[in-house]
Image (spheres, rainbow, N blue to C red):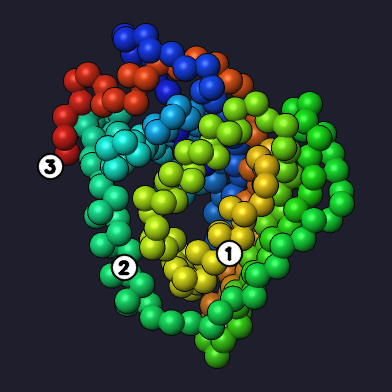
Amino acid sequence: MRCLILILALEIFSYCDIMYEMSTITEGMTGIGCETAMRICVKGDCSRTDINSKNSMVGDITNITITRLDKKLIWSLDSARKQYSVTTFGELMKSEKEKIEEVGDTIKPEVKVEKTGKKKTLLGHTCEEVTVSMNIKSNEGHVAFTQTLWVAKDIDGYDEIENFNKKLNNLKSGLSSPPIMGVNMKSFNEFQKKVSEISGFPLEFNMNMTLAAEDVSFSMKMRSMITKIETKPLNQKIFEIPAGYFLQE
């Protein structure tokens, strides 16, 4: 899921393009809260994500990321400074492999996927409830994730997202997710793999995470809602570096 769009000059259109907007509220870490608004667009091998976050600790943050599968790279834009940075998938592969070696092996997580049979309507689409849970118990402590997704299968443009994610996963084959609050990359990646196997597009997403160890206790809750989704022609040139931006040293 990644990608917003800025309209530039050259008009090259595709009628399978998709744009959706999402709002997320995160709570946890002894009261720290964050509200995030995202606009994501996908067109062929290109995607762009604009994220605006309001954090009670650090204030407002804007992140813009363009993923180009055709170029095998990711651009991160800093609109305030009119500059950008570049990360190739080769660099990602090297970095994540080094992290895996540092973390080493851990206990295989217990991951469960369940279709509850519950249904509800969101944005005019019938959604089915699916839960995914993961538990990791070791001598160091206990970590538990639970995700509840309301999934729709009749979303126009979903094939565009699915095709993009398949190509992205092929390029990132062998990469693991970064460690989160004591969960190593292999364990969290196993969890995310189960989520990615769920058929359909989640219009609502809820996550609960708890961590308990000898000297630390932590919980986090996150709720995401798709607030708008539409297919419309998008300009291919919107996934380029904007004029006037320079490469960050």
Q: Which of the two residues, 25 or 192, is positioned nearer the viewer here?
A: 192
Q: Which residue is mark 1?
A: 191
Q: What residue lies at 57% left-to-right and 86% top-to-bottom?
A: 138
Q: In this rendering, does residue 107 appear at all?
A: yes
Q: What residue lies at 53% left-to-right and 32% top-to-bottom?
A: 160
Which kind of residue does numbered mark 3 sit on? Glu
- Which badge, 1 or 2, is on the more N-terminal residue? 2
The answer to whether 74 is drawn above or below residue 26 in the figure is above
Q: Position of residue 222 (x, y in %)?
A: 63, 51
Judge the density around disc 2: few (<14), some (14-19), many (≥20) Cα neighbours within 10 Å: few
Q: Residue furthest left?
A: 249
Residue 165 lies left or right of residue 89; in this view the side is right
Q: What residue lies at 75% left-to-right and 53% top-to-bottom?
A: 130
Q: In this rendering, does residue 52 appear at all?
A: no
Q: Tell me the SS state at disc 1.
A: helix
Residue 30 image-quadrant placement = bottom right
- Quadrant housing the C terminus: top left
- Which badge, 1 or 3, is on the more N-terminal residue? 1
Q: What residue lies at 58% left-to-right and 53% top-to-bottom?
A: 196
Numbered mark located on residue 249 in the image: 3
Q: Which residue is mark 2?
A: 97
Q: Nearer the viewer, mark 2 or mark 3?
A: 2
Q: Nearer the viewer, mark 1 or mark 3?
A: 1
Which kind of residue does numbered mark 1 sit on? Phe
Q: Position of residue 33 (x, y in %)?
A: 56, 49
Q: Tell me the SS state at disc 2.
A: helix
Which kind of residue does numbered mark 2 sit on? Lys
Using the numbered discs, state the Cα–Cα distance from disc 1 to disc 2 in whole angstroms: 18 Å
Judge the density around disc 3: few (<14), some (14-19), many (≥20) Cα neighbours within 10 Å: few
